[in-house]
Image: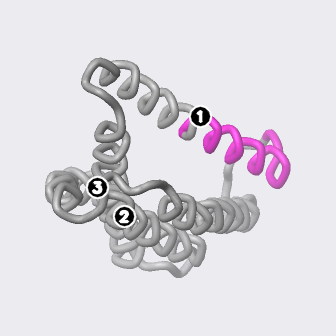
Amino acid sequence: MISQPIVQAFFSPFAGRLSDRIEPRIVASVGMALTAVGLFLLAALNEKTTLGFTVASLALLGFGFAFFSSPNTNAVMSSVENRFYGMASGTLSTMRMMGMVFSMGITVLMFSIYIGKVQITPEYYPAFLRCLKLGFTFFAILCFGGIFASLARGKVR
């Protein structure tokens, strides 16, 4: 599972510099597209999925996150005056945290509906995998929609 954050940490500075030269909404939208592809790949997980496939899918997610996060932050911070940097940064962090909380809530809701309040033992693996597939597919579709929202925002330059 460490492949995703390592790739993100490695490529985020590059994506930030790239968004200084290329319109940030374009770079962020490419990152969102890569993230959607990574989520769709993870939706294909099954009991025969290799470790290599999982690591590669997570690395693609890290690459997508890197190419979305830094340019998105660049676009937001470039759109406000210097005196509002603190408020913009706080709002951006709050929105990021709310996204994480809501996505975790949606995931827990899916697990509650499809699996219930049970310990995940081998007999529940098929239901667990169905939940994972549903979750990854749902979030990939949301991410796919986010590509167009990212492209639709105004130009920074």
Look at the image and give the residue range highlighted in magenta: 100-117
What residue is at 36 percent from the left and 66 percent from the top?
26
The image shows residue 112, relative to residue 123, as above or below, that is: above
The image shows residue 88, relative to residue 140, as above or below, that is: above
Label 2 to label 1, Cα distance in Å? 20 Å
Q: Nearer the viewer, residue 3 or 27?
A: 27
The image shows residue 112, relative to residue 61, as above or below, that is: above
Residue identifier under label 3 = 157
Among the two numbered marks 1 and 3 on one chain, the one whose residue lies closer to the N terminus: 1
Percent from the top left, x then y, of residue 98? 57, 32
Residue identifier under label 2 = 64
Among the two numbered marks 2 and 3 on one chain, the one whose residue lies closer to the N terminus: 2
* Disc 3, SS: loop
Residue 136 on the magenta span: no
In-image side of 111 versus 14 (left or right) = right
Which amino acid type is marked by label 3?
A: Arg
CA neighbours of label 1 inside 10 A, class few (<14), some (14 to 19), many (20+): few
Please tell me how many numbered marks the rendered image carries: 3
Percent from the top left, x then y, of residue 60? 35, 70
Label 1 to label 3, Cα distance in Å? 33 Å
Query: In the rendered view of the protein, which quadrant contains the N terminus?
Result: bottom left
Q: Nearer the viewer, residue 91 or 103?
A: 91
Residue identifier under label 1 = 101
